Amino acid sequence: MDFTMKQVIVVRKDLHMDVGKLVSQACHACLEASEESKKRDLKAWKTWRREGAKKVVVKVDSVEDLLTLEKRAGRLDIPKALIVDRGLTQIPPNTPTALGIGPGKASIIDAVTGELKLL
């Protein structure tokens, strides 16, 4: 099956989060970006779901890299969600940890995230 839609979850590796923390931050990013997409373009969101809700998880090495991706996605009007941790467990409060990009057209999302390495 060809996927026309996808979602990319970007996590920061420089924070050295435990696996459970990293997964929970990625899940927050996935869910929040999905909800944003659903509000903005229900038809596109339904297409993504019908295709199997493709998700790809990639990594960046710094908060600067994460915020740059958020800005690029915003300029292309891609649904996105920046996750900022409350600081209740492993990392300081107000730390950006992850970014959900899409779901949206795979070709547009690839223009933002295509060069990133898989987690």
Image (cartoon, rainbow, N blue to C red):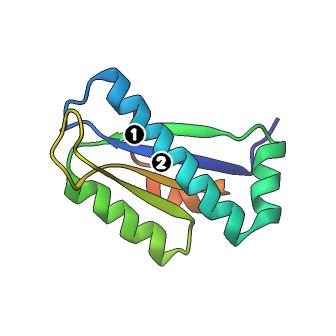
Is any part of residue 119 visible from this angle? Answer: no
Residue receiving disc 2: 29
At x 44%, y 39%, the residue is 26
Residue receiving disc 1: 25
51 sits left or right of 21 in the view: right
Given residues 1 and 92, the one toward you in this image is 92
Q: Residue furthest top?
A: 19
26 sits left or right of 43 in the view: left
Three-letter amino acid code at the position of disc 2: Ala
Return the x and y of residue 27 as percentages of the image width and height.
50, 38
At x 71%, y 41%, the residue is 53
Disc 1 to disc 2: CB gap under 8 Å: yes
Q: Residue furthest front?
A: 88
Callout 1 secondary element = helix
Three-letter amino acid code at the position of disc 1: Gln
Return the x and y of residue 91 as percentages of the image width and height.
18, 39
Given residues 112 and 38, the one toward you in this image is 38
At x 24%, y 40%, the residue is 88
From the viewer's perspective, is residue 52 above or below residue 65?
above
